Image (spheres, grey):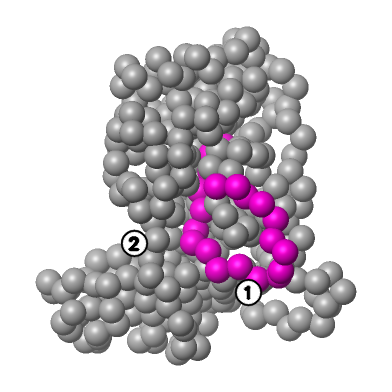
Amino acid sequence: MRLDICYRALYAYDSWVAESQNEVRAAPVTDGRQHLVAYRLSVAPSSRAVAFTDYWGTRVDAFGVREPHLSLEIVAEAAVETGEAFLLPAPTDFDALAEPVFAATHGEYLARTPHADWGDGLAAAAADARADDIVATVVGVHDLVRERMAYEPGSTYIGIEVEKVLAEGHGVCQDFAHLAVAMCRSLGVPARYVSGYLFTTSDFTGEDVDGDIVNVQTHAWFEAAVPWYGWMAMDPTNGREVGPRHVKIGHGRDYDDVPPIRGAVSGSSVALVETDVEIRRMDPSQQAAVVQPPLTQPIGEPAPIEAQQQQQQ
């Protein structure tokens, strides 16, 4: 499937900002399931960005605005080709997790992190999902999170403890993903948080779209490591495996490793933030006629946007 994506973020400050330094993680990754065709980042006020790949393998566009400004607008455009979901791995015994090379290369995805620091309540709930093999256990965690959680936009906040998320039983895709990651790790299965986009009109149902354009927010899911297979990607928010309508940006131990935008400003200004993601599904017969933006990161004045009220992802 060919998807064209436009991520927009507008920061409107209540007083002049003398300087800001920013990092953007919005470019889809190229991996075994998807291919990044083109990517372009635009910023206003204009600034030159430096692109690099961080420790986790995610592209980062870093830039600074060194002139006084009352607003900052960021537009990231990407064209991506996605493939079908991978077949689930064969049943794998838990003893395989102790294989020396696997254990050495996946240990950091077993550690407690600020957004995936579990307690007795979560560990007990995760134990109910444990099966005789790793794959069935990961599916069980996915199903348990889906069953225990209600999707309620705006009901939580970035940084909420996973124990509280589980106890209250509601949240957004971030919370579903963090909860699944913490449950897997509590059972000894390495797991990581994934940031991306989803072509759907509803994060919770993940249903297909009648038309070819949707306006959404960024999405999140999780991946669990299975020896001799790789990373098994599941989306508990809409109760399915990750497929062709999912576009991955990057992964990390939790949200803090892959935030769409991270920055700092000089001054005491407060910002009103508005974000929007437009995803367009391209007709295969029209793809050859589409002129792609260059695979660079030119910086300049982006086209005006009609920003929408930010929602927690």
Residue 70 belongs to magenta span: no
Q: What residue sits 75% from the left and 39% below the top? A: 86
The amino acid type, in three-letter code, at marker 1 is: Leu
Residue 192 visible to the viewer = yes
The amino acid type, in three-letter code, at marker 2 is: Arg
Give the residue at the far right of this rendering: 285
In the rendered view, tell whether residue 241 sits above or below residue 123: below
Q: What residue sits 38% from the left and 66% below the top? A: 310
Q: Nearer the viewer, residue 217 or 19?
A: 217
- Residue matched to label 2: 262
Image quadrant holding the N terminus, namely: bottom right
Read off the magenta span: 204-223
In the rendered view, tell whether residue 262 sits above or below residue 19: above
Residue 65 visible to the viewer = no
Q: Secondary structure at mark 1?
A: loop
In screen coordinates, is 222 left or right of 162?
A: right
In screen coordinates, is 15 left or right of 2?
A: left
Image quadrant holding the C terminus, namely: bottom left
Q: What residue sits 33% from the left and 47% below the top? A: 156
In the rendered view, tell whether residue 295 sits above or below residue 92: below
Residue 209 belongs to magenta span: yes
